[in-house]
């Protein structure tokens, strides 16, 4: 296992990096990143059914389509994104929730009582979602990615993901709305000390390094950055990709 923590906050760069790691790498990888305010929609979703376009434009929230399906999600600087990318394992379904175990172990170790839901998401207090996930399965590789709400702007999240112009005649996968809560609020409610999102995410990263018995994180090489930039420019920066539905 290798852990890479992206230095970029660009959603188009980080989504391009996911595709690069999925297609070009041969080893297991955990990719961590934090995006600037953005809405990331599933590959087969219709934007008009998921996103309030006017609200996003007025609040400089970028909209980008990812390579995996399922729900639309909101990213900002209070939200950590984790991506497990690996080779398929023999005699093991790629669609189980085993990839979430390291995240669950870290959160429980930090005093956060969390459980895995039926859609491979993470819940606290039995009613608040703190992490949604999606997967992309290829012939030889599998990608599982999720968000982790620590101190996200929930006002922005709720309004950005509240489409007012849904077209139910469009054939697309619709998101399932859930109650959400920030981990920082949960910790405060339980009398625990809290810190900034940046420090909390660093702590998560260090604990994941311990779980996987790693001595540190790996940086992207210049050649890898160039390859990712090409995917970014040729796909994820293009309206033809993001607004295809």
Image (spheres, rainbow, N blue to C red):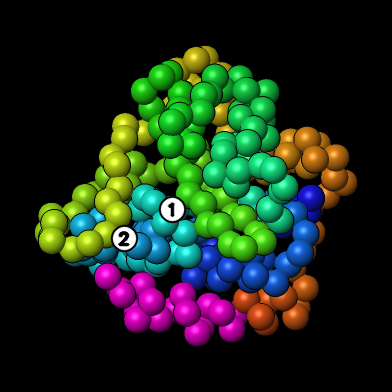
Q: Is residue 4 left or right of residue 179?
A: right
Residue at the spot x=31%, y=35% of the render? 178
Look at the numbered disc 2 and give the secondary structure of its residue: loop
Query: Of circles 2 and 1, which is in front?
Result: 2
Answer whether residue 122 is visible to the viewer in this image.
yes
Quadrant of residue 57 in the image? bottom left
Q: Which residue lies under the disc numbered 2? A: 45
Q: In terms of sequence position, does the residue under pointer 2 or pointer 1 come before the other?
A: 2
The C terminus is located in which quarter?
A: bottom left
**Distance Cα–Cα, label 2 vs label 1:** 17 Å
Say which residue appears at 59% left-offset and 83% top-offset. Answer: 230
Q: Position of residue 157 (x, y in %)?
A: 32, 47
- Examine the rendering and report whether any part of residue 79 can be seen: no
Q: Is residue 19 magenta?
A: no
- The disc at residue 151 is none
Q: Residue at x 48, y 49 (%)?
A: 134
| Residue 116 x, y percent position in the rendering | 51, 28
Q: Is residue 83 left or right of residue 236?
A: right
Q: Main secondary structure of the magenta part?
A: helix
The stretch in magenta equals: 229-245
Q: Which residue is mark 1?
A: 75
Vertical position of residue 5 compared to residue 207: above or below: below
Residue at image point 38% right, 76% down: 241
Q: How many marks?
A: 2
Q: Position of residue 111 (x, y in %)?
A: 61, 20
């Amino acid at each position: 296992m290798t852990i890479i923590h992206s230095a970029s906050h660009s959603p188009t760069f980080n989504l391009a990096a996911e595709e690069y790691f999925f297609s070009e790498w041969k080893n297991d990888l955990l990719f961590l990143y934090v995006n600037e305010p953005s809405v990331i929609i599933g590959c087969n979703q219709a934007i008009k059914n998921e996103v309030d376009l006017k609200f996003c434009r007025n609040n400089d929230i970028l909209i980008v389509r990812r390579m995996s399906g399922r729900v639309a999600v909101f990213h900002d600087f209070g939200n950590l994104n984790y991506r497990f990318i690996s080779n398929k394992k023999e005699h093991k379904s790629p669609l189980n929730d085993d990839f979430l175990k390291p995240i669950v172990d870290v959160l429980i170790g930090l005093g956060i009582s969390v459980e895995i839901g039926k859609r491979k998401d993470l819940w606290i207090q039995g009613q608040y979602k703190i992490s949604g996930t999606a997967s992309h399965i290829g012939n030889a590789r599998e990608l599982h990615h999720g968000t982790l709400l620590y101190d996200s702007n929930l006002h922005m999240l709720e309004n950005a993901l509240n489409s007012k112009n849904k077209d139910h005649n469009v054939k697309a996968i619709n998101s399932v709305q859930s109650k959400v809560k920030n981990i920082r609020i949960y910790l405060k409610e339980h009398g625990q000390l809290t810190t900034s999102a940046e420090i909390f995410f660093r702590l998560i990263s260090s604990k994941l390094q311990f779980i996987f018995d790693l001595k540190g994180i790996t940086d992207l090489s210049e050649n890898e950055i160039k390859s990712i930039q090409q995917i970014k420019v040729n796909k994820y920066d293009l309206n033809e990709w993001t607004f295809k539905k």
